[in-house]
Structures are given as structure tokens and as C-alpha cells.
Image (cartoon, rainbow, N blue to C red):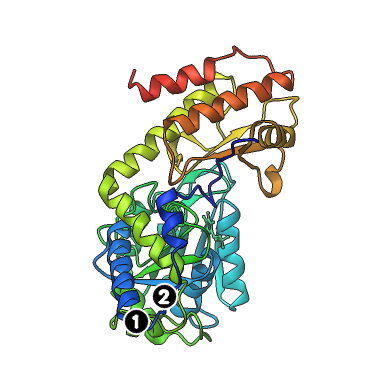
Amino acid sequence: MQKKYLMTPGPTPVPAEVLLTQAAPMIHHRTPDFSAAFAEAIKGLKYVFQTEGDVLLFASSGTGVMEAAIANCFCAGDTVIVCRNGKFGDRQKNICQVYGLNVIDLQYAWTEVVRPADVEAALKANPEARGVIVTQSETSSGVLNDVKAIGAIVREYPETVLIVDSITGIGAVDCKTDEWGLDVVMTGSQKGLMLPPGLAACTVSEKAWRAYSRSTLPKFYFDWMKYKKNIEKDTTPFTPAVSLVLGLNVALKMIMDEGLENTIARHSMLAEATRKGCEALGMKLFAPEEGRGSAVTPVWVPEGIDGKKIVSILKNKYGITIAGGQDDYTGKIFRVGHLGYFGPFDIITTLAGLEMTLAELGYEFERGAGIKAAESVFMGE
Ligand SMILES: *Cc1c(COP(=O)(O)O)cnc(C)c1O
């Protein structure tokens, strides 16, 4: 027998309370029982999104809600500014191109943050732009983009919506949807919401509803208005992911009981301990100091070590699943997820496993230095 640890930024570990709720016998979705649960879920989602506006919930993975944002806000030929500094930003650009949008491409290296001044300049140069699209927490790189600053810029353009992929942001870092002027903010269930994959949610501001009204791109399953009209009656246009919605309420209650601010503070401490632990082992962090998120910590694989082996030894020998690098960074970085149902000892365990793995691979470092550095963070030293 081997005890398993899931240390990836999605899917993330699911608390037992949430799992057990989903094991309950199926209920029908056109019943007062489900309607009550659904209304509670929408209310809880508004809390985590920090919005008083509309929240829509879909049975899909995160990419569904990303595609939906494009189909619901724009017309073919519309100009949009896509800010991308990682794999998920790239995906957003691909979706825009599939829908025939004219993309102004603000491309950065994966190790850079999106510069709000560039967004401002792009909007000045292209005032007809109907949208700005940005990833708050770039899961491929661990970079945190400043959506608050970008929100303050886009707010000045009444016909331009700001679409934010916060799929690994919500529940891990602060995302003040209303206060920061974010028009569409998206998340997925298998990330900070501590659920299995299968649900995705987004907020829709007044400005985004205006964009919806003029949008002519085709949409059916993901047509926002169908969801809004049904939510007003505490129901859904199509069969919802009933068990996931019931589980969502348990997960949301856990976040509410902790208090969103404390949830975010916990993530920030877990991220800090992971960073300090890896640095104490002589490794370098991938994300730049001015933009490090709390969902995932990517780390450069030390010189002369095979990065794929770090991931495979950790998994096969020690039962700890971390993520490798993606695209150009395959084998060059590894990523430790700490998004959702995580506590200090998940980090200590992972750092201990990492030390044993690195020792086996012949990397030279002071044994115990990683866990000691993490302990100091948790003890507030
Ligand atoms: C996980 C993730 C998505 C969505 O991916 P799915 O596999 O479709 O759920 C989108 N953006 C970011 C930043 C993510 O981490």
C-alpha cells in the first residue's frame, strides 16, 4: 500500500465531506430540493467571486466557460486585446481566432508579468477594441497578473469588456470582481473550489450584458441568457451536474467557515513556505518576484538533473503527484500545486519527498534545509 498525495494545480484534492455528499442517491433536478441547493450554490459563488452581480454555473470544464465568454460577448471581426504569458493565455488567443476575432496579441515570455501600461497603450492605439482578455493566475508559469490595475484601465472604456481567467485564482488569491471592475471572471470546480472536475462558473457584469446584447456569434448550450433566466427561477436550462452542485455547497461552506480572507492568507502562506523550501535547497523559482501567485509554485530543475525523473520518482516511489513543465518547459521546470484543500503538512511532506528524490538523483544540497525553511514560515519565524 502507498498513501497518495495530489499536489497539482488541478485537479486538486477533494475533502472527504465533499466526496461523501456526492455519494448520496441521485435527486431529480426539477424539484424544490435541487432548487434550494442550486440557489445556495449561486449565493456561495457570489461570495467567492466577491460580486453582487450575476454568476452563471455550467456543467463543463474550465475551457467551456472560456469559450462561452468569447461567444457571448463578441461578433465576428471584433477586435480584442489578448494578454498572454503562458499556456492558458495561448488557449484564450486560439479560441478568439476560432471565432474569427481580430486579435491584438500582447505576448510575453512565461517568466514575465503582463504590464498594465501595455494594455493602456494597446487600448489607446485600438479604441475600437471590444474586449481585453487576461489570465489572473497563469497555472503554467505560476505568474500572477495584476488584474486590479488592468481593471482600472479598462473601466474607462464603456464598450470594452474585461474578461479574466481566474480559474486558479478564485479561492487562492484576491479577486475583487465588482470593486476592481472585472466584467467576466471565470473559475472551474477542480481548482480552488476543491471539487472533482465538471463544473465551471463565471460572473457577468452589466457591461458584459451589454456586450451580450450586441453579440452575434453563434451559441446554444453556453448561451448566457438561458442560464440567467433559469437562475431567476432557481434552476438550470439543461440537466445540471447534480452531485457536483451538492458537493459545491459543502466546499463553499468550508470556505465561508474559514472566511475568504483567511483562505487567501492560508494560500499565501503555503506558497511562501514552498518557495522558501525550494530556495533553501538551492533551486531557483520560475515566476518573477513582482508576480508570484499562490496556486502553484513552478521551480527550475537544477542543472544536470532530469526534470521528468523528479516527477516520476516522486510519484512512483513516494506517492506524491506534482506537475511537470508544459510546452517549452517540459522537463525544465516542475510545479507544486497548493490550491484548495491544503495545509502546512502537505508542503512539508512534498519538500521531504523532493529532498529524497533530489538526493537519489545525485543533486548536492543540505538535507533537511527545505523542510526547515518551510517550518520557519509556518511558525512565523
Ligand atoms: C485549469 C485551467 C483552465 C481550464 O482548463 P480545463 O482543463 O478546461 O478545466 C483554464 N485556465 C487556467 C488558468 C487553468 O488553470
The answer to whether residue 165 of the structure is visible from this angle is yes
Q: Position of residue 120 (x, y in %)?
A: 40, 58
Q: Nearer the viewer, residue 92 or 14?
A: 14
Indicate the position of residue 294 as horizontal and vertical percent values.
43, 41
Q: Secondary structure at mark 2?
A: loop
* Relative height, residue 314 to residue 194 (above, below): above
Residue 55: x %, y % from top left: 34, 70
Q: Amino acid at mark 2?
A: Ile
What whole-number distance in Å separates the C-alpha atoms at marks 2 and 1? Answer: 8 Å
Secondary structure beneath dot 1 equals: loop
The C terminus: image quadrant: top left
| Residue under the image location 40 percent in, 52 percent down | 17
Front residue of 248/52: it is: 248
Indicate the quadrant where residue 366 lies: top right
Which numbered disc covers residue 268? none
Residue at the spot 58% in from the left edge and 78% down from the top edge? 99
Check whether the beta carbons of the residues at disc 2 and disc 1 lie within 8 A of each other.
Answer: yes
Rendered position, 230 above or below 264: below
Residue 27, numbered circle: 2
> Three-letter amino acid code at disc 1?
Thr
Label annotation for residue 31: 1
Q: Position of residue 327 (x, y in %)?
A: 69, 49
What's the residue at 32%, 50% (across, down)? 254
View quadrant of ligand 1: bottom right
Q: Relative to residue 183, is residue 368 drawn left or right?
A: right
